Image: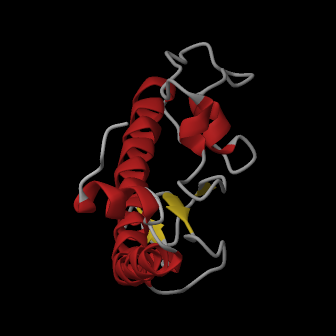
Amino acid sequence: MKEMSESQLHRAHSAPRADGFTLLELMVVLLILVFLTSIAAPRVTHYLRRAKVDAAKVQVDALASAVDSFHLDMGRFPSNDEGLEALVERPADGAKWDGPYVKKRDSLSDPWGHPYRYRFPGTHGEYDVFTWGSDNKEGGDDDAQDIGNW
């Protein structure tokens, strides 16, 4: 029989080492991740809100241009009853209508999912194209601000 050295004998009798992480190590890593998320999440949310406001401004300008094109072709602005739908579908008296002036019906909704509003005659100009923002109520700040073609 072969004799074992003292170090081999010690290794053979010691408890096997478990591979992996201890519960304490996992808890520390999770705590660090939660801390980093709590710092980053408000900044990301701020940028997302800002992006929706910027998108609404661009969309309002595009809709105002479409209303101007409708006016050039038809010789009139859409009525309040027709609204912005007249940019997508030919009105009843639309012999000169050369639309659609807006490619997608989805473009008639703001980034928060509310339909853009149209008013003729406008209170800020010949006509108003606007959204009341995220809260869908007149007035407000930040992403709840009113955004229009004025």
Q: Position of residue 1 (x, y in %)?
A: 37, 36
Q: Quadrant of the C terminus?
A: bottom left
Q: Nearer the viewer, residue 52 or 70?
A: 52
Give the residue at the far front of this rendering. 1
Quadrant hosting residue 119: bottom right
Q: Position of residue 109 (x, y in %)?
A: 60, 48
Residue 126 as seen in the image, left or right of residue 61: right
Specify whether residue 118 is in view: yes
144 w.r.t. 72: above or below: below
Q: Position of residue 87 (x, y in %)?
A: 57, 31
Specify whether residue 20 is in view: no
68 w.r.t. 55: above or below: above
Q: Position of residue 98 (x, y in %)?
A: 49, 15
61 w.r.t. 82: above or below: below
Q: How many marks?
A: 0
Residue 36 as seen in the image, left or right of residue 22: left
Residue 131 as seen in the image, left or right of residue 7: right
Q: Which residue appears at 40% of the width and 31% of the height?
A: 69
Q: Which residue appears at 45% of the width and 24% of the height?
A: 73
Q: Which residue appears at 66% of the width and 36% of the height?
A: 85
Which color mode does the image show?
secondary structure
102 w.r.t. 26: above or below: above
